[in-house]
């Protein structure tokens, strides 16, 4: 029987696979996942494995056969349906690689559904490896047991980001100068009269180390969907600001579709 989104699930290894998941289907793992499952996790024929692909929910499968070079998994049943992916978006000035990877990993754990790296005068993007960035997101999703994968947009300029931003999705600009309302108040305002309903769509914008150059922010305050918010009295690193802002949103709204407040 399929479980709901809150039913405890087995602690069996959980793997992302880029394959269609359906009852009775067989999924062949690549060399890296085979090594992890059979050598690192020491799972053998008949062992239970949990699979997700970001589209078809969470599935129970079992190791079939004894091929130690390329494991095959036989799907049994769906345990959870695929949830709606309507969490916050995170736009950020591109930091150095360790901080970038931290933002992607922790942002995935905290429910971000889209990452939008922004190039600026103080954050010129180095050459990014899309495959490595995707792997970071996948591993974080496996670890935190979410069933959808956030997307990673190509690096773009701030002006292009604003031009393409959906006007019905509030963009909370975390001002490193401390301007604006406290972010918790701004997030609280995204709820309608019925506090059991999910908040209106929203996203965050975190500037690069040192902030955006003055010319880059010209006219930002005149954009209807942008709200300036403050994260407190201390100056935060870009990666700290991103995670702090997402954590505040998570505390207020869960993943955006599971409100947890009782006010």
Image: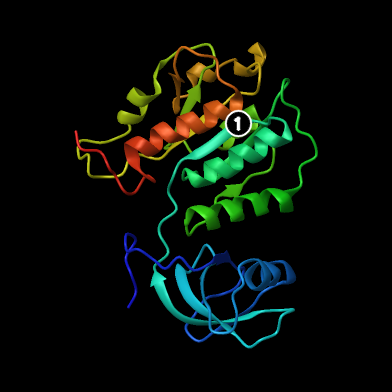
Horizontally, residue 77 falls left or right of residue 159, namely: left
Q: Is residue 209 above or below residue 254?
A: above
Pick the front one: 167 or 72: 72
Pick the front one: 228 or 47: 47
Q: Residue at x 64, y 44 (%)?
A: 153
Residue 99 in percent (x, y) is at 66, 33
Residue 113 in percent (x, y) is at 50, 47
Q: Quadrant of residue 201?
A: top left
Q: Is residue 71 above or below residue 136?
A: below
Q: Residue at x 63, y 70 (%)?
A: 37
- In the picture, the quarter occupied by the C terminus is top left
Q: Residue at x 60, y 33 (%)?
A: 161
Q: Residue at x 32, y 59 (%)?
A: 6
Q: Is residue 150 above or below residue 233?
A: below
Circle 1 residues within 10 Å: few <14, some 14–19, many ≥20: many
Q: Is residue 159 visible?
A: yes
Pick the front one: 253 or 91: 253
Q: Which residue is mark 1?
A: 92
Q: Quadrant of residue 249?
A: top left
Q: Is residue 156 visible?
A: no
Horizontally, residue 140 falls left or right of residue 260, namely: right
Horizontally, residue 57 falls left or right of residue 210, namely: left
């Amino acid at each position: 029987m399929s479980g709901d989104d809150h039913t405890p699930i087995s602690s069996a290894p959980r793997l992302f696979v880029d394959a269609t998941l359906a009852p009775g289907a067989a999924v062949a793992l690549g060399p890296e996942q085979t090594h992890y499952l059979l050598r690192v996790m020491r799972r053998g024929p008949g062992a239970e494995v949990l699979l997700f692909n970001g589209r078809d929910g969470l599935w129970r499968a079992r190791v079939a056969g004894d091929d130690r070079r390329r494991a095959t998994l036989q799907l049994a049943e769906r345990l959870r349906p695929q949830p709606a992916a309507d969490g916050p978006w995170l736009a950020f000035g591109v930091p150095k690689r360790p901080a970038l990877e931290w933002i992607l990993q922790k942002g995935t754990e905290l429910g971000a559904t889209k990452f939008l790296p922004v190039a600026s005068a103080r954050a010129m993007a180095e050459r990014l490896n899309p495959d490595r960035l995707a792997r970071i997101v996948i591993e974080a999703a496996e670890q935190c047991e979410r069933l959808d994968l956030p997307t990673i947009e190509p690096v773009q300029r701030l002006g292009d980001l604003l031009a393409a931003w959906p006007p019905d999705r509030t963009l909370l600009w975390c001002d490193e100068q401390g301007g604006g309302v406290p972010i918790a108040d701004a997030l609280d305002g995204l709820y309608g009269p019925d506090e059991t309903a999910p908040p209106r769509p929203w996203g965050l914008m975190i500037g690069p180390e040192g902030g955006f150059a003055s010319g880059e922010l010209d006219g930002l305050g005149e954009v209807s969907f942008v709200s300036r918010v403050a994260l407190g009295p201390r100056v935060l690193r870009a990666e700290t600001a991103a995670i702090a802002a997402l954590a505040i949103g998570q505390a207020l709204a869960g993943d955006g579709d599971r409100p947890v407040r009782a006010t």
